[in-house]
Amino acid sequence: MPKRTADAFVYREIDGLSTKEICKLLDISTTNSWVMLYRARMLLRRCLELSGIVTPGERAEK
């Protein structure tokens, strides 16, 4: 995963930063931040599927 995409994911999911804060830190637009977060989630999902931790199409419980 590209570093900036990983950074955006960590800022959101680990650090709990808002979209506005992420955009300011990475100097990106709101739309770009949403795309980066979506791609990070899809890459993480694919990694979990390939490792056998989750099956394809399985939804995470909330």
Image (cartoon, rainbow, N blue to C red):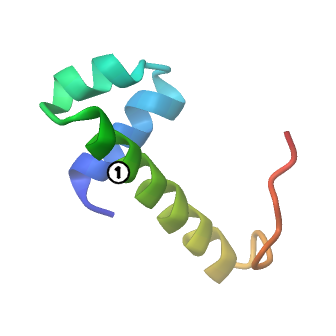
Q: Position of residue 31 (x, y in %)?
A: 31, 41
Type of amino acid at the residue the image marks with label 1: Met
The total of numbered circles placed on residues is 1
Q: Which residue corresponds to the image point at 24% horizontal and 27% vertical from the top-left?
A: 23
Q: Residue at 87%, 47% (x, y): give it.
A: 61
Kindly indicate the quadrant of the structure image that contains residue 56. Answer: bottom right
Q: Position of residue 25 (x, y in %)?
A: 19, 24
Q: Nearer the viewer, residue 14 or 35?
A: 35
Q: Residue furthest front?
A: 31
At x 17%, y 33%, the residue is 26
- The quarter in which the C terminus is drawn is top right
| 18 relative to 41 in the view: left or right | left
Disc 1, SS: helix
Residue 41's place in the image compared with 27, above or below, is below
Q: Which residue is mark 1?
A: 36
Q: Position of residue 42 (x, y in %)?
A: 53, 64
Give the class, few, some or many, for how many residues have Cα within 10 Å of label 1's Cα (few <14, many ≥20): some
2 displayed left or right of 11: left
Could you say which quadrant of the image residue 52 lies in?
Answer: bottom right
What percent of the width, then of the height, locates residue 50?
63, 82
Looking at the rendered image, the quarter that the N terminus falls into is bottom left
In this rendering, would 48 be left or right of 30? right
For residue 35, above or below residue 62: below
Looking at the image, residue 55 lies above or below residue 40: below
Furthest residue in direction right, as rendered = 61
Left/right placement of residue 46 relative to residue 35 reads right
